[in-house]
Amino acid sequence: MSKSIRVDEETHAALASLKGEDETFDDLLTRLLRERREEIRSGAGLWAGSDAAERAREKRQEMKRGVDSR
């Protein structure tokens, strides 16, 4: 079953510029989603065994405190 998705002209033009010559918009969106999933998977676990996650949490808290004090 197919579905229609409304996009504005600018979005359509941006998608069309990414679309391969023999690629449908459905193919394009499927490819973009697959690539995005692969990017996320490739980054999973990068911080394992380091204190980077904790440092990021601390920095986020510092930023939030800075915004709250305004």
Image: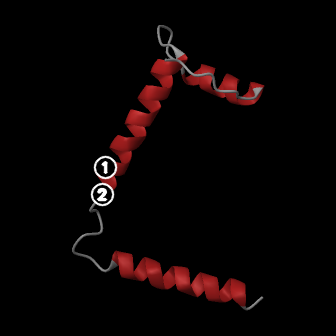
User: Looking at this rendering, what residue extends furthest in the left direction?
Assistant: 49
Badge 1 amino acid: Arg
User: Looking at this rendering, what residue extends furthest in the front direction?
Assistant: 1
Q: Which residue in the protein does label 1 denote?
A: 41
Badge 1 marks a residue whose secondary structure is helix
User: Looking at this rendering, what residue extends furthest in the top direction?
Assistant: 22
Circles 1 and 2, Cβ within 8 Å, touching? The answer is: yes
Relative height, residue 8 to residue 66 (above, below): above
Q: Is residue 53 shown left or right of residue 18?
A: left
Relative height, residue 56 to residue 35 (above, below): below
Q: Is residue 39 shown left or right of residue 27?
A: left
Q: Position of residue 7 (x, y in %)?
A: 70, 28
Q: Is residue 62 shown left or right of residue 55?
A: right
Q: Which residue in the protein does label 2 denote?
A: 44
Q: Position of residue 9 (x, y in %)?
A: 76, 25
- At 61% from the left and 82% from the top, the residue drawn is 63
- Quadrant of the snapshot with the C terminus: bottom right
Badge 2 marks a residue whose secondary structure is loop
Q: How is the image coloured?
A: secondary structure
Spatial CA span between label 1 and label 2: 5 Å
Q: Is residue 14 shown left or right of residue 29?
A: right
Relative height, residue 34 to residue 63 (above, below): above
Q: Position of residue 56 (x, y in %)?
A: 44, 77
- At 45% from the left and 80% from the top, the residue drawn is 57
- At 35% from the left and 76% from the top, the residue drawn is 52
Badge 2 amino acid: Ala
Relative height, residue 48 to residue 65 (above, below): above
Q: Quadrant of residue 35?
A: top left
Q: Quadrant of residue 30?
A: top left
